[in-house]
Image (cartoon, grey):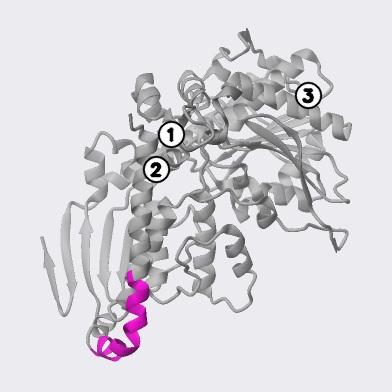
């Protein structure tokens, strides 16, 4: 039987094969261009100065009519423009930014340099489908400067299990309290949180990270990795940090990682374990989904459990160490993330395409560049604005598309418990069959919601605070104008990270707002306003139409 996993891999293989031939075709076209370029400049080059464009509108309205896409219709672009000829269009910055306008996708073809169009198409396809390998942390992190001197960074594995390892990052001057980070467990490797690790290293902390392995590489004999096993490793890793440092860790959990982290904290609190966290920061995760509903919750609740079990998960095929392990394929998970906000991803890819067709392509190779190669290139001093934008965009995309398969039980239990059952807020969470009582979390807790988060919508993270009666210091931050991955951006680390570090050092003296139930009402109001804006986008969307512009005329249909 051919599994969905194997079929997905076969599709990626065929697209990459096509991409390879496109690259060869583009190279051949470029090789003969020395003979044909004067002719192309004199003929087709006319359209680079006088472009023709085909404008198609109504995509947002059409998406709203489709039950499968209706929940995310506002996230579709309203207009797609195919432009033949470079024209005078100036592309804006391509770094992902929540304040950008996602109404229009413009794809620009070069008239006089058709080989660039082929290269751009090939690179876009290979970037989407290439099996990107997990980056080495040494290629992503830099040696921190402490006491005005660069300190060599040491990275080592201090504890190993079948499914996950505990990594330590430190220098000889990492003398502050230990930070333990539970990275997201949603189809990405822990390398996704390297900006968070770097930030703590630069502040002088030793950092410990829960490093999830690709489930397709874990042999079936090593057993499952569901919620109970996740909680177990959380407690084991907190204990290991305590054994190494003699201090209670300051725990940071991101996205779904916050669920097992919270349960582990409650169990350790009930035991009054010496390695229970000193304090806890929970960022962009589903603490209480009853506060607001995101697209993930809406779609999750509309589909039966059988859909996720039989359509969204599959078995690892032969050729991998984890053959016959039941998994959620990482590339499928990333694809579903992209469907949550399709316009952002379409515009990013279109802008990347446009930069290549406009000649900003000296860094484009026959296979996607690695993160190390991209970071090395970004250190050059001769980069122009568009080239630097291109490299930054490639760096973000390469890491975003580097996916890890998840154990199916982890995925299914997250859907059932986190996004449907709301088991933390409802008091139905268990560990090894025993009910978990959140009142035993007595240490300070800080939550961080992003205002425009479409995965764990605003209020869901801080909603956990309403169910922690034992904590005497509960505070909440709302990251203004940003989405789910706000914690990975520069704005977050310039504005919000210093506040978080200060709170972790001395919670009682922090200026961060103390949590009150009224803050949940504020979050609901902001969410309602966000939803109204989404509905207004659909209502104001253009009707379906096709227009052709250029050569002194305009046609409409």
Evaluate if marks 1 and 3 touch, with contact meaning CB atoms under 8 Å apart: no
Q: Residues within 10 Å of mark 3 (few under 14, many from 20)?
A: many
Per the model, the C-alpha gap separating discs 2 and 1 is: 10 Å
Q: Which residues are magenta?
A: 25-42
Q: Viewer-nearest of labels 1 and 3?
A: 1
Q: Quadrant of residue 21?
A: bottom left
**Residue found at x 48% / y 43%:** 452
In the shown orientation, is residue 282 left or right of residue 94? right
Q: Position of residue 213 (x, y in %)?
A: 60, 36
Chain-order first, disc 2 or disc 1: 2
Per the model, the C-alpha gap separating discs 1 and 3 is: 40 Å
The residue that disc 2 covers is 9
The residue that disc 1 covers is 317
Q: Viewer-nearest of labels 2 and 3?
A: 2
Quadrant location of the C terminus in the rendered image: bottom left
Q: Position of residue 302 (x, y in %)?
A: 34, 24
Quadrant location of the N terminus in the rendered image: top left
User: Would you say residue 40 sits in the magenta stretch?
Assistant: yes
User: Would you say residue 372 sits in the magenta stretch?
Assistant: no
Q: Is residue 50 above or below residue 219?
A: below
The residue that disc 3 covers is 276
Q: Position of residue 103 (x, y in %)?
A: 33, 55
- Type of secondary structure dominating the magenta stretch: helix
Residue at the top extreme, as displayed: 434
**Residue found at x 28% / y 76%:** 85
Q: Secondary structure at mark 3?
A: loop
Is residue 79 or residue 188 the one in the foreground?
188
């Amino acid at each position: 039987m051919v599994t969905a996993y194997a079929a997905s891999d076969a599709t990626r293989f065929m697209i990459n094969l096509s991409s390879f031939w496109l690259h060869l075709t583009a190279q051949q076209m470029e090789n003969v261009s020395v003979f044909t370029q004067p002719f192309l400049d004199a003929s087709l080059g006319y359209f680079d100065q006088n472009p023709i464009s085909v404008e198609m509108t109504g995509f947002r309205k059409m998406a709203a009519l489709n039950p499968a896409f209706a929940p995310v219709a506002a996230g579709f672009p309203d207009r797609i423009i195919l432009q033949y000829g470079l024209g005078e269009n100036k592309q804006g910055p391509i770094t992902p930014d929540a304040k950008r306008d996602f109404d229009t996708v413009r794809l620009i073809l070069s008239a006089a340099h058709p080989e660039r169009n082929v290269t751009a198409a090939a690179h876009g396809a290979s970037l989407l489908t290439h099996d990107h390998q997990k980056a080495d942390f040494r290629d992503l992190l830099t040696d921190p400067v402490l006491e005005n001197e660069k300190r060599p960074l040491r990275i080592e594995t201090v504890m190993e299990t079948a499914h996950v390892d505990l990594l330590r990052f430190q220098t000889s001057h990492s003398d502050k309290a230990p930070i333990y980070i539970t990275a997201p467990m949603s189809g990405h490797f822990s390398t996704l949180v390297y900006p968070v690790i770097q930030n703590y290293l630069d502040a002088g902390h030793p950092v410990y990270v829960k490093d999830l392995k690709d489930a397709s590489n874990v042999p079936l004999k090593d057993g499952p990795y569901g919620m109970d096993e996740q909680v177990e490793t959380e407690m084991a890793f907190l204990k290991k940090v305590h054994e190494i440092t003699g201090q209670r860790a300051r725990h940071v959990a991101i996205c779904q990682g916050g669920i097992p982290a919270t349960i582990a904290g409650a169990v350790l609190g009930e035991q009054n374990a010496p390695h229970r966290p000193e304090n806890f920061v929970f960022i962009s995760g589903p603490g209480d989904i009853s506060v607001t509903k995101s697209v993930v919750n809406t779609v999750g609740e509309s589909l039966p459990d059988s859909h996720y079990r039989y359509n969204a998960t599959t078995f690892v095929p032969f050729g991998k160490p984890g053959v016959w392990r039941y998994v959620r394929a990482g590339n499928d998970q990333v694809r579903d993330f992209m469907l949550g906000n399709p316009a952002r991803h379409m515009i990013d890819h279109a802008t990347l395409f446009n930069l290549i067709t406009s000649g900003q392509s000296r860094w484009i190779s026959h296979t996607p560049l690695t993160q190390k190669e991209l970071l090395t290139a970004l250190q050059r001093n001769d980069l122009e604005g568009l080239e630097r934008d291109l490299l930054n965009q490639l760096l973000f995309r390469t890491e975003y598309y580097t996916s890890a398969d998840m154990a199916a039980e982890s995925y299914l239990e997250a859907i059932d418990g986190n996004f449907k059952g709301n088991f933390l807020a409802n008091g139905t969470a268990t560990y090894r069959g025993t009910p978990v009582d959140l009142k035993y979390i007595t240490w300070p807790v800080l939550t961080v919601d992003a205002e425009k988060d479409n995965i764990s919508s605003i209020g869901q993270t801080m909603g956990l605070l309403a169910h922690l009666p034992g904590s005497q210091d509960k505070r909440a931050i709302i990251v203004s104008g940003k989405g789910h991955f706000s914690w990975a951006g520069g704005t977050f680390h310039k504005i919000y990270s210093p506040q978080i570090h200060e709170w972790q050092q001395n919670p009682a003296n922090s200026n961060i707002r103390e949590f009150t139930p009224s803050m949940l009402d504020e979050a609901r109001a902001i969410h309602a306003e966000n939803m109204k804006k989404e509905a207004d986008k659909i209502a104001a969307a253009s009707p379906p139409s096709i227009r052709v512009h250029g050569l002194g005329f305009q046609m409409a249909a």
